[in-house]
Image (tube, rainbow, N blue to C red):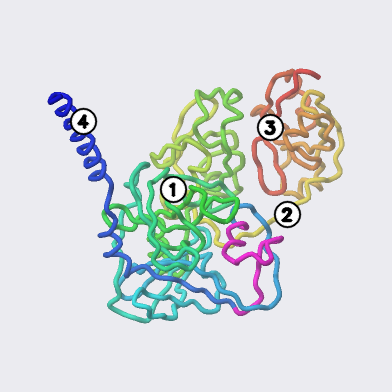
Amino acid sequence: MTRVKARVALCCALVLTSIGVQAQSLPDFTGIVEKNAPAVVHVEAKFTGKSMTARGMQGMPDDQAELFRRFFGMPMVPQQEQARTSLGSGFIISNDGYVLTNNHVVEDADVVQVRLQDRRTLTAKVVGTDPQYDIALLKLDAGQLPAVSIGDSRQLKAGQWVLAIGSPFGFDYTVTQGIVSAVGRNLGSGDQPYTSFIQTDVPINRGNSGGPLFNLQGQVVGVNSQIYSSTGGYQGVAFSIPIDVAMNVVQQIKTKGYVSRGMLGVAVQPVDQFVKNLELPNANGALVGGVTAGSPAEKAGLHEGDVILAFNGQPITQAPDLPPLVGMTAPGTVARVDILRDGKKQTVNVTVGELPRDKNAVGAAMAGKPSGPAASAALGLSVQDIDADARQQIGLPAGQGVVVSRIDGPAAATAGLQPGDVILMVNQKRVGSAAAFRAATQGIKPGDTAMLLVRRDEATSFVAITVPTNR
């Protein structure tokens, strides 16, 4: 009996010890909150003009409608003349009153007010904004304000603890915690293509936008910006803008009033579908689908079909990795671009240009007065030559491209080709006439995947067409 009691006591001691070790390993966030909460602010942006909301989202709160627009691409439509308010969070980055928040919180606002933890409400001046990075810099007419400490988001790793303070649903100074789920997360070309986000599982909701993300040292490492949700509420995935990116924006706004980004002048796309065509060992890299005329990339000799493997020593594992790296590079910098061309690795030096600040949509008619038809039954399409007048109209050099005149079969239709598209290359062979297209497609058989370089409007990209085997 004594031995049994001793064993029970030993087991209890081990269990209690284990619980104690686990408790000690969990972080205590109280110190971080007490030190930094006074530097976190509640932001109210007031609009007195005609408001905009996502189509079909009338009646939904403004910030929730904005979330649906940003993630699901719903177009914005004007509502009736009415006053409205956008709520968000922010944080003081210097004692003289500079405040960081999201651009989408204050964009086009007539009045921006900031409420401090001591319950003072101050009117903020919008010093500058950058929609591409979704950052806004505000200035309060006050001094000796509490400010956060800025950390280094480049040191973040998946699995590290992080903490958010903000005003979800208007509940000021709400504290939530979680871990870094991933770093360098790119959301694609449609949404902030120049930002590599920090992904976390920290509960972030409407009103948290613009608030700080802290590491365990109590330093800000990110600006809470977006959530991925089908309902408008938190579903376990949140995204923060790295503080290194945000502070770069701050510095540029302060010194020159706007933000400049680097530009190569290439359109890139995933390599995945073309690994076999390009004889690649894996799907790493960004496939160049288009090169802008007169751009730094064209001047350096980059062309369609090149696979970009690294930019200034940073590996490119997927196409969305490239824009953030290029965007953060100062215009005028000579960058090393490692590429794979015709199965051989080489390095090209490119003098990075400056991305235009104004987006100009340029449309061009791709149909002309074609002649000389050719058809590919395997690919399921017909093409025709492009005459001189049509070439001049669309800015296409002589001897380049054929126009798709008709979709004949399921292969081209499934790939998304349309009449009026211009085909520039077939399996990396340039085609400038219907006869050249016919020759380039002769050897394509059922089961093969053809790699076509296609131009539509002003954009070019590679398209994979897999020939059905049951024709």
**Residue 363 badge:** 2
Spatial CA span between label 1 and label 3: 40 Å
The vertical placement of 322 against 255, above or below, is above
The amino acid at mark 2 is: Gly
Q: Is residue 321 left or right of residue 212?
A: right
Residue at (68% x, 49% y) in the render: 458
In the rendered view of the protein, which quadrant contains the N terminus? top left
Question: Considering only vertical position in the picture, is 416 above or below 331?
Answer: above
Judging depth in this view, the residue of 245 and 112 nearest the camera is: 112
Give the residue at mark 3.
452
Question: What residue range appears in magenta?
Answer: 48-69
Chain-order first, disc 4 or disc 3: 4
Reading the image, the residue beneath label 1 is 201
- Which image quadrant is residue 273 in? top right
Looking at the rendered structure, the secondary structure element under dot 3 is strand
Quadrant of the frame with the C terminus: top right
C-alpha distance separating marks 1 and 2: 42 Å
First in residue order: circle 4 vs circle 2: 4
Residue at the spot of label 4: 11
Q: Splitting the image into 4 quarters, where does residue 452 fall?
A: top right
Q: Position of residue 242 (x, y in %)?
A: 40, 53
First of labels 1, 2 by sequence position: 1
Instruction: Check disc 4: other Cα within 10 Å, few if <14, some if 14-19, many if 20+.
Output: few
The single residue placed furthest to the front in the displayed view is: 1
